[in-house]
Image (cartoon, coloured by chain):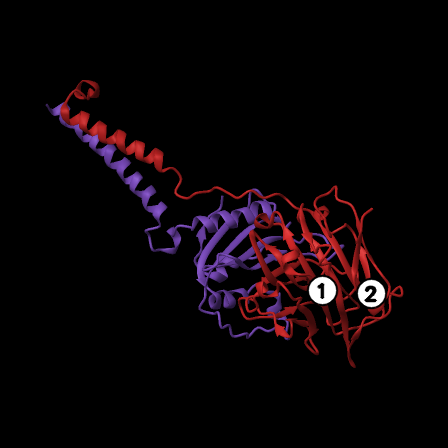
Amino acid sequence: MRSRGKSALVLAAAVAVMAALVATVLLSSVGSPATAETASVPPWLQERALTLVTEGCQDANPSAVYWKLTTVGEYHVASRQWDPEAEDPGADTDAVSANSARSVYVVVAHGDFTYGWAHIRDGSSLPTGHTLVVVYDLESQVMAELNLLGSDVDAESALGSMNDMTP
Amino acid sequence: MVHLVPELNSCTARGLCFVAVILLAVLAVTGPAVDTAQAAAHLYDDNDRTYSYGRVYNSTSHWLGAEANIEVRSGDLDSDDANAGGFVDETLWIAPTLTTPYWVEVGLARGWEQSDILTFYWVCRNATATGTPPTYYHEHKVWNLNASNYTQQSPVFKIVNVEGTNSWDVYIDGMPADDIEDDNRAGTPFDRINNYDAGLESNCASGKMGTSSNPVNITTMKKKTSSGWSFGPPYDGYDHGYRLIELNPVYGYSGPTAHGYWDVSPGQRTWNYRNN
């Protein structure tokens, strides 16, 4: 009788562990957690961004890929920290955006990139770089802006807490 | 020592095992948290590029802006792989010299990143003031002008230096070509240009730019000097001073095996296609 009780307890413990594991998987797939660190990436964004990184930018194994849902205004402020135009006194750094409240997804990737989908001038080589910052409009899911930086820039720190979707 | 196997005959243990099996099955079916399927796309390199454009160039000139009107109906721009990184576009490029690895361009594209759409855009390829790495490439979708309104008319592209700076403002039909940040200004390492190009570019394996009944025309290629705007200097005797540089046939282009070429007739501002 005592032995039977112990067996039941062991099995109950095993079931509890498995149930917790299943619950964790299910919760992460539906994106229930509200914290940025555990938010669920929209499938369309993951597909588009990873295809851009691995095929458009020709790095099948990027060292890191992050994403974040933010606004144009917040992105504009953060981008001043890596955009060399901000260092140009003639640059339009104080543009007040009518779209500043517009929701956008920002993707930051690090790797060894050659952007094959670039628009280039005849005789020029494809742009290369190590940091990719891409902005997707939430509503239309169309890419609004792409930045390929030659050096490895910590753009994710400027943008604040980001989510990991490194493949 | 606890002997589990004999105890499994009990009703309680069998019930718990049944629950465990169900949970394991759910876990197996649920799989990865996120769908990782990716769209088909192919790699592109420099060899995929197709160009046909007019060029105004004078090695000793220092111009402050350029303007071009490239007549091609947007409905006659098509890329078969526009949803997988392919595109065709009509574009104005400016650059300080023929060989510097940086420039500014504005254009109308069919195919944008992985979207099969028609859109205006502008691009700046940048570098440090000395022209050395690190480089910087950025492209912007134009947000305040609807390219779909241009199916029957051609836009006028213009890029103008912001006086006294290395920045250049980008315009389409006299309107600022604003990106999603309401910004139409490109910062560069240069404040003067000595050449500009206007024409077509494609990276797709199959597509079209113009048709026999609606061929591509360049009706304007102007430059800005300190005294105002004027047409480009005569070049090889062609009207309005631009010549065509053809790297691949574009009109009727349907793949690597397509053949044909563009030509320009002196005194005319039309690209004429001829079969080989």
Q: Nearer the viewer, residue B88 or B188?
A: B88
Q: Nearer the viewer, residue B86 or A165?
A: B86
Marks 2 and 1, how far apart at CA: 14 Å
Chain B colour is: red
Q: Please identify the quarter of the rendering in which residue A58 is found.
A: top right
User: Horizontal and vertical percent for residue A65?
Assistant: 50, 50
Q: Residue at position x 71%, y 61% from top? A: B102
Question: In what element is the residue under mark 2?
Answer: loop
Q: Please identify the quarter of the rendering in which residue A87 is found.
A: bottom right
Query: Subunit of mark 2?
Result: B
Question: In what element is the residue under mark 1?
Answer: strand
The quadrant in which the N terminus of chain A is found is top left
User: Horizontal and vertical percent for residue A49?
Assistant: 52, 50
Whether residue A109 is situated above or below residue B63 in the rendered picture: above
- Farthest residue to the top: give it: B6
The answer to whether residue A118 is visible is no
B80 horizontally vs B9: left or right: right
The answer to whether residue B253 is visible is yes
Q: Residue at position x 62%, y 68% from top? A: A85
User: Horizontal and vertical percent for residue A7?
Assistant: 18, 26
* Residue bearing the label numbered 1: B70
Look at discs 2 and 1 and give the one toward the viewer: 2
Query: Subunit of mark 1?
Result: B
- Farthest residue to the front: give it: B213
Report the number of discs: 2
* Residue bearing the label numbered 2: B268
Q: Amino acid at mark 2?
A: Gln
Chain A colour is: purple
